[in-house]
Structure formats: structure tokens, C-alpha cells
Image: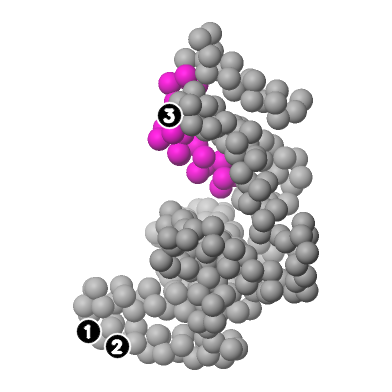
Amino acid sequence: MNLEELVNIMAALRGPNGCPWDKKQTRQSLKAFLHEEAHEVLEALDENNPESIKEELGDLLFQIVFHCQIAKEQGEFDIADVIKGISQKMTARHPHVFGSESFQTPEEVLVHWEKHKRQEKKHQKSILEGVPKSMPALILAHSIQERASRVGFDWSESRGATEKLDEEISEFKAALESKERQHMEEELGDILFSLVNISRFIGVNPEDALKKTIKKFTSRFQFIEQKAAERGKSLSEMALSEMDSLWEQAKTCKP
């Protein structure tokens, strides 16, 4: 099997004698599936299971081929145009590989990358344009901060970021005293934004960090549920002190 065969399968599914479900789909109806498949790829990457990664990448590729087929039917473009476009873009953005430029560090490459992207989009008014607003908020914040950093809008060291966090926490405490919902929401957002900035400085993906903590919390909470069941109780029947004791036990177990 190769890409051309997959494209032909997609064309047959959308053809006169194809699948009623596939023929009915539109760009809008497929958005949820594209979103789901992308997240399943991310989950497979987290599990680091080659077979799962291979399978989920295939499902994501199928969605791409699906959209290309719809565009072809409408006389807009096909998958060959998509491949040609991205090939030309990557070649142009890597003159140190396909041309005569010489970049020695990843930072130099990023500076050129942003410069070239601005040249490609001459009417772009802001370096922050083009960041997908539909991304999870933590990743969106990370991407925006990263772009701002590329033009020098950044602290020179992580200490500035941590001091900013301290400042935001103080402002949040003041907002709690005011009990004004909008004020509290704003200051809480500032704390989260500052935490993402710190994660960027230390090279930690904030989305991954939070997911790992959620996984850890889930494992420990389920340990409490299991122990409660062994005692013939539901959690609602247990005192907080008893649950706290089980929580401490859970912390000694591997997640």
C-alpha cells in the first residue's frame, strides 16, 4: 500500500457507488473527527507504543486525505497540491539544509524561521497572528510566549519569571479579599499564564505536566475508593481525616 492507493480508496468511498456516510460528510462535519484523531495521536505518543502511534497516525492521515478529496471534488486543490505546497515551504524555510545559508544553533534557525514566515505573509500585522486559538489554553499560552520571546520580549533568566509569579499570587490574594468574581478570574488567569512562562524557561511542556499530575491524582483517589470499598464504606461515609490518611498511604504507592 502507498499514499496513492489510500487516495484512490477515499475517492471510491466518496464515489457514486461509495459509502452513504462518507459521501454525506462535509468539512464542518469532519472537524470533530480531525480533532479527536489528533488527540489520539498525542495520547499514543504519551504511551510511547509504536503500534498505537502507527495506527493513530494512519487515522489522522485518513482525515487529511478525506479533506483533500472534498477539496478536489470542489475544484480547489488535491493532495498533490498539498504535498507540493508544504515541500516548497519547508525547502524555503531551511536554506541551511537546501541552500547556502549556515546556521549553527537551533536559536539561529528559529530567528530565520520567523523572519521567513513574515516575508511569506507580508500583510501580517502581528507576530502572534496564526497561532490557532482553538488549542488548549496552556499550549496556546506557551506558543504565544514563545513567539514573543523570539523577538526579544522576554526575561533574560528564569528568576524574572518566578518573581512575576510571586507578584501575581499577591495580586490574586488581594482579589480574593475583594470577592469580585471578574477580578478573581483575571488574577487567576495571570497566575496560570505566569506558570506557563516558567514551564517554558525550564523546558517543560505545561500540558504534559498537568496531565501527569491529573493521572497521579486519579490513581491516588482511586486507591482511596478501593480501600473504602474494602472497609465496606463509600467515600461520603468517611471522615475527611480518614480519607487524608488513605491519601498519604496512596502517595507511597507507585501511580
At mark 3, the secondary structure is loop
Q: Residue at x 53, y 8 (%)?
A: 17
Whether residue 22 appears in magenta in the rendering, the answer is yes
In the image, farthest residue toward the front: 100
Amino acid carrying label 2: it is Ala
Please provide percent x and percent y for residue 150: 57, 75
In the image, farthest residue toward the top: 17
Q: Residue at x 74, y 47 (%)?
A: 49
The tag earlier along the polypeptide, 1 or 3, is 3
The tag earlier along the polypeptide, 3 or 2, is 3
Residue to which mark 3 is pinned = 26
Amino acid carrying label 1: it is Ser
Amino acid carrying label 3: it is Thr
Residue to which mark 2 is pinned = 174
Q: Is residue 135 placed above or below 110 in the rendered structure? A: above
- Viewer-proximal residue, 12 or 120? 120
Q: Is residue 235 visible to us here? A: no
Q: Residues within 10 Å of mark 2 (few under 14, many from 20)?
A: some
Instruction: Confirm or deny contact between disc 1 and disc 3 (CB under 8 A).
Output: no
Whether residue 83 appears in magenta in the rendering, the answer is no
Please provide percent x and percent y for residue 71: 49, 30
Q: Which secondary structure is most common in the magenta stretch?
A: helix
> Colour scheme of this structure image?
one colour
Please provide percent x and percent y for residue 167: 41, 90
Q: Residue at x 52, y 40 (%)?
A: 34
At mark 2, the secondary structure is helix
Q: Which residues are magenta?
A: 21-40
Instruction: Confirm or deny contact between disc 2 and disc 1 (CB under 8 A).
Output: yes
Instruction: Confirm or deny contact between disc 3 and disc 2 (CB under 8 A).
Output: no
Residue 5, by quadrant, is top right
Residue to which mark 1 is pinned = 178
Q: Is residue 158 visible to us here? A: yes
